[in-house]
Image (cartoon, rainbow, N blue to C red):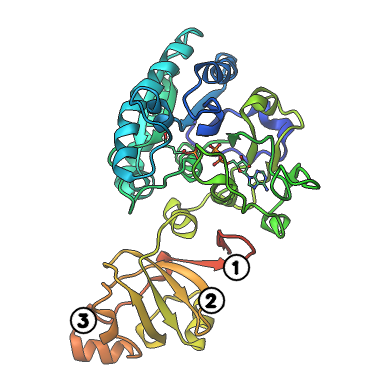
Amino acid sequence: MPDVTAAALHDRQQLPDAARVVVKVGSSSLTSPDGRLDPDRLRALVDVLAARRNAGGQVVLVSSGAIAAAIGPLGLATRPRDLATQQAAASVGQGLLVAHYTKAFADHGLRVGQVLLTAEDTVRRGHYRNAHRALTRLLALGVVPVINENDAVATDEIRFGDNDRLAALVSHLVHADALVLLTDVDALYTGPPSRPGSRRLTHVAGPRDLDGIDVSSRGSAVGTGGMVTKLESVAIATHSGIPVVLTSAAQAGAALAGQDVGTWFAATGRRSSIRLLWLAHAARTHGRLVLDEGAVRAVVERRTSLLPAGVTGVEGTFDAGDPVEIVGPDGVVVARGLVAYASEEVPGLLGRSTSDLRAALGPGYDRELVHRDDLVLVRRRRGPAPAPVG
Ligand SMILES: Nc1ncnc2c1ncn2[C@@H]1O[C@H](COP(=O)(O)OP(=O)(O)O)[C@@H](O)[C@H]1O
Ligand SMILES: N[C@@H](CCC(=O)OP(=O)(O)O)C(=O)O
């Protein structure tokens, strides 16, 4: 398989011809109503994915369900809420989950390879290359990679928690032609699916089509992010040129066959740096830099780096290299960036010109606070996820 991105698919009818798809299945689609792993549901999904693989298409599966798989075996009443028990449950459940996948795919003559990733693995350059190499080789060997977040070692600070955004970053990592998000509702609706009057969205051309869509209602009891993280995943994938289909696991076969099910999200951008995608959509920020009006204009309109001279305030505690929010004098977030100084250094730099800083503190202190290559603009839209612009 050549390691290049083909032109983006234009509509769902082209899905049957997609060479490489990433399929993400949520906990809610793999469990019975009591929250435990349901092997029959898992097997039904595998039947669909194996048929695709055996017809020549490459499939990367991002599967949640490790924690759910451990609820029964560990004698837990419900899904654990604290991090330590979630880590322990994921450690027990992941092995059980993959054992089910190994058996179910083997019944179709296929092998699976387990890959556990943290957020860092998808964005740090060395890690990214390493994960890319392993996944590409697995696919070349005809294996179906089964990916999950490495929950047992992911701390609250660095974990995604849901697999939706991880699946979008994996789609970027493997140069997927499409991302299929499978959940317990058959599509994105204009409001909570249970609310009378909510309508299915069949085609979303871009972020503006999502204005006014209500995704605030909580997801299933076993799922993590609800529709909010799914739309964040959609934003990451579509913005980097990968279209997304969102539907229920029961409709997976129909979706892959290009039938009119679920919601199709068209690609809106071109392949871009995964680090900036992560910064725009997935990174947890550690603080804020408050800008004066002139600096906002320079950063937003002229796309310059952010210099200390235009910064009037700093909030939070961060190290050099951490993600921060960049806000205007009115407190509105205009960008996100990787800051080049630790928070304790910043107050001494504020409002000072680079020549003044060089003279007072020496060379090295005349550098940008946030370099333009480490900065993404965000456009505010209704809803929780900032959409990058430009
Ligand atoms: N506008 C909406 N359209 C569709 N589903 C929605 C909407 N708003 C909230 N939801 C909820 O999102 C849930 C899916 O998210 P989640 O439970 O996290 O699933 P998963 O385990 O597949 O990740 C659905 O059960 C649904 O009730
Ligand atoms: N990594 C976790 C997934 C957490 C989760 O529930 O995610 P999701 O169902 O995709 O919202 C697990 O395997 O249990």
Residue 378 x, y percent position in the rendering: 54, 66
| x then y, percent, for residue 341 | 27, 73
Q: Percent x, y for residue 374?
A: 40, 65
Label number found at residue 363: 3
Residue 263 shown left or right of residue 369 in the figure: right
| First-in-chain label (1 vs 2) | 2
Rate crowding at label 3 as few (under 14), some (14 to 19) or many (20 or more) other CA atoms within 10 Å. Answer: few
Residue at image point 75% right, 28% down: 259
Is 49 in front, or is 183? Answer: 183
Secondary element under disc 3, as helix, strand or loop, is loop
- Give the number of the mark in front: 3 or 2: 2
Which image quarter has ligand 1? top right
The quarter holding residue 122 reads: top left
Q: Which class describes the residues within 10 Å of circle 1: few (<14), some (14-19), or many (20+)? A: some
Q: Is mark 1 within 8 Å of ligand 1?
A: no
Query: Which residue is labeled 2 in the image?
Result: 332
Q: Which mark is residue 380?
A: 1
Three-letter code, disc 1? Arg
* Nearest to the observer: residue 112 or residue 78: 78
The image shows residue 103, relative to residue 324, as above or below, that is above
Question: Left or right of 122: which side holds 52?
Answer: right
CA–CA distance between discs 1 and 2?
Answer: 9 Å
Residue 356's disc number: none
Distance (Cα) linking label 3 and label 1: 37 Å
Disc 2 packing (10 Å; few <14; some 14–19; many ≥20): few
Q: Amino acid at mark 2?
A: Val
Q: Are marks 1 and 2 in contact (CB under 8 Å)?
A: yes
